[in-house]
Amino acid sequence: MGSSQTFPIAGISLAAVTFAALLMLGIDVVIALAVLTVWVGSLLVAAGRPPEPPKAKTKARLTLESISDLIENSSIPLVITDRNTIALANNAARRMLGPHVIGQDTRVALRNPEAISLLGDNAQNEAIVRGLVRRGDIWQINRQMIDERMAILEFINQTAEADISRAHTDFVANASHELRTPLAAILGYVETLQEGDGKLDTPTARKFLGIIEREAQRLHALVSDLMSLSRVEAEKHDLPTTRIDLAALVERAARDAAGSNRIERLVLDIAAEPVVLGDTQQLEQVVRNLVDNALKYGAADAPVTVELNLAQGDLARIAVQDQGEGIAPEQIPHLTRRFYRTDPGRSRASGGTGLGLAIVKHIVERHRGRLDITSTLGKGTRVVVRLPLAEPEAQAADSPPETDQEAPRAPETEQLS
């Protein structure tokens, strides 16, 4: 018998009393014992019935309320359809498609042939859909059946990944083009010199060699800028920690960029001596690039002003102003793009690589700063870099202030009071 079954004590007790009564009445012992045996045996058989079979587990049916509790706060847009009607949409899906989609036909809500093709059967499918919410966006839609009526649609935004892939493709294409141009010139003039059989006169040979040297220097500058850009992008999440005297750095880098042949055009206006946390090499590169651009593209006989002062909000401000032709307003937002040039022919002739301002932008971003470019046609361009000031250095706990060092030492009891 199972542990959960009840032993028939009362019935057996009654059988024993009956057995004793039969003996007292003079009934044969064998007959009385047989009656007792049958009685007790029937009680035990009745008490020892088999256990009940285990109840079959039934799968609880999902309801819209239970599903809503599960998906409402998911950051991925999720939609529950009931026979091609949107029965439920979580918060992210309502923001994407609008709150009015609940209760709509799914084909009307999506309005995209590729997305609608997912609804044709009960299979689990996925599709890549373009322009679902905004023009140019890319979404991966996954459909999975919940039961014979309901299905779940999952929307995964792949626009950022596509933009990154496109940017890499564009960068490789532009870099290849920029590298191929000077290489073609170098190879062409070298082949000409080799095929001359010594018949080229000296002035022509010197001209060709000059072009080869210029293009090789341009190629070297381009490779150096590509390496600098890659290094800056790799370190863009590392906040610099070195304390730098910005006044000395700006003056040194500006003079290096001007060189001895352009130093007379450089005007320095250093009105403050701020200290910032930064990378010395990268901040020097920022100043050199800005000053070099201003000297290249400004008027040949006009000065270039480099200012260093303090801006509101605990910021150091570096401003570089030229007096050149200026830049059209519609071109200013594109100036920090890789290989972007307002005048490609003039930029290449001056030795520019098209990467200078892109490098400046990434360095300023790494230093948690801000880059602003303003320009007026016919008057010139002004580039401003704002960098956060470093916190004052904490004075060592065991070093008394300078005034205390000069004053007589107080008794120990007074210092403790």
Image (cartoon, rainbow, N blue to C red):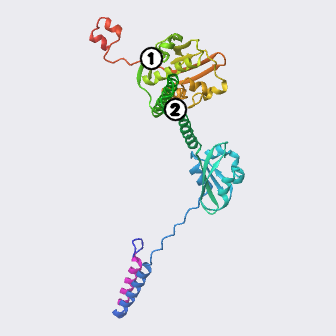
Residue 339 percent across, percent down from the top left: 56, 31
- Residue sitting at 44 percent across and 81 percent down? 46
> Looking at the image, which residue sits at the far left?
412
80 or 245: nearer the eye?
Answer: 245
Which residue is identified by label 2? Answer: 192
62 or 23: nearer the eye?
Answer: 62
| Residue 249 tag number | 1
- Is residue 104 a member of the stretch shown in magenta? no
188 or 158: nearer the eye?
Answer: 188
Task: Rate crowding at label 1 as few (under 14), some (14 to 19) or many (20 or more) other CA atoms within 10 Å.
Answer: some
Q: Quadrant of the N terminus?
A: bottom left
Q: Decide whether the magenta segment is chiefly helix, strand or loop.
A: helix
- Is residue 18 a member of the stretch shown in magenta? yes
Q: In the image, which is nearer the foreground, mark 2 or mark 1?
A: 2
Indicate the secondary structure of the residue bearing disc 1: helix
Look at the picture and state if 30 lies above or below 119.
below
Residue 283 percent across, percent down from the top left: 46, 22
